[in-house]
Image (cartoon, rainbow, N blue to C red):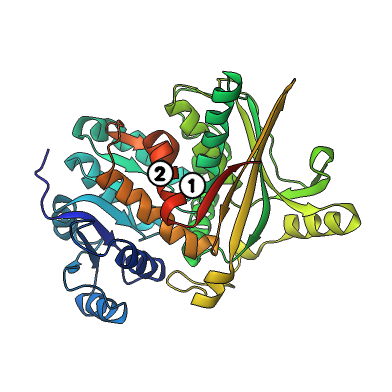
Amino acid sequence: MMSKTTYDVIVYGATGFTGQLVAEYLAKTYTNKDELNWAIAGRNLDKLEQIKSNLNLSAEVECIVADSDDLDSLKSLVQSTKVVLTTVGPYQLYGNDLVALCAESGTDYVDLCGEPTWMHDMIGKHQAAAEKSGARIVFSCGFDSIPFDLGVYFLQQKAQQDFSQTFSRVKGRVRGMKGTFSGGTKASLQATMAAAKKDQAVMQVLLNPFSLTPGFTGPEQPLGNKPIYEDEFNSWSAPFIMAAINTRNIHRSNFLLSHQYGEDFVYDEMMFTGPGDKGKAIADHVAADKSMASDEGPKPGEGPSKEEREAGFFDVIFSAQEGDRQLAVSVKGSMDPGYGTTSKMISESAVCLAKDDLSVKGGIWTTAPAMGDKLIERLVAKAGMTFTVE
């Protein structure tokens, strides 16, 4: 393992829209080097210096030049920090070398990846190296998939406490949300779909709910691709765009937790649109919406204003019922999910790996088995999120 020097966390991609929000959050939350020794990195030194000036970052926050096309610069970056926090996506275009270097060198890594086919590929290529080096590689540390992955985990921990057993069937439902999906999320989705159109094998991975659990296939899962009326919630439910990634991550969490939720675990994710004809009309509209595939909306590096981010929120409920046992928990965020809360979630994930006493060893992880209760504590204490039994 290479020696670690200098930094706890390096924010790679700090000149991008989300990277700037991460830098701003870390500067406000961790005000001196003793709390967190961190740096910002990107391709262009002048832009990094400009960001540092614009955000009024401490002189202690150094600027590091690194480029996904320059392997030596990435090696230097990886060797000088405990954790690399990268917002440079789509990861299937810009992330391969960085993951490989972290896995080889024992450097921890967090990203905002919502690209299941790329994650499947990275697990196959780098799981063994990460286990050997001690690198903890944690994908999907933003709105996809922290509220969902940790929401199911939180429910199952409560079920274990209350009933001495977990639930084999959990429903995740977005109860309310205001905000924009990030330009990066959209670009990732478009890159994934373009790859799937070219290659049938990519499409098969994309459609498989167990694509991130090598060697294990569980029971058939609900597709969640059509509007349905759900009596138990007195609401119509529509397809949820993030379900395709969140469900895969949650099955991987169960797999990595030695099937704590059961080998017969079934999970689906949709969004409420309300009761009656109006609820049905909204559900039909959501199901037909193709805007994520269009060129409208924010591009990577663009995003909503501070006022828009602060006016945003999300509210997700997780519900389980088996026989006499029933339990519902909610996960809420107090800012726009795609940018405001996402920048806090990935920041706290990186700090959790850098600073907290975690028992997790090297490998390619999801957030629940890697950081679980410690990350929930951080998100509640610092990131404006709540985890509540309803």
The nearer-to-camera label among 2 and 1 is 2
Placement of 134 over or under 51, stated as above or below:
above
- The residue sitting at 40% across, 45% down in the picture is 139
Could you tell me residue 155's position as x and y percent? 58, 34
Q: Which mark is residue 146?
A: 1
Q: Amino acid at mark 2?
A: Leu
Along the line of sight, the residue nearer the viewer: 202 or 110: 110
Give the SS element for disc 1. helix
Figure quadrant of the C terminus: top right
Along the line of sight, the residue nearer the viewer: 235 or 189: 235
Residue 126 visible within the image: yes
Q: Are marks 2 and 1 in contact (CB under 8 Å)?
A: yes
Q: Amino acid at mark 1?
A: Ile
Could you tell me residue 173's position as x and y percent? 67, 45
Placement of 267 over or under 148, stated as above or below:
above
- The residue sitting at 42% across, 37% down in the picture is 372
- The residue where tag 2 is placed is 375
Distance from the alpha carbon under mark 2 to that under mark 1: 10 Å
Residue 114 relative to residue 32: left or right = right
- The residue sitting at 46% across, 63% down in the picture is 184
**Quadrant of the rendered structure where residue 322 is?**
top right
Q: Quick one: label 2 or label 1, which is nearer the N terminus?
A: 1
Placement of 349 over or under 52, stated as above or below:
above
> Label 1 neighbourhood size at 10 Å, few (<14), some (14-19), many (20+)?
many
Residue 179 relative to residue 138: left or right = right
Give the SS element for disc 2. helix
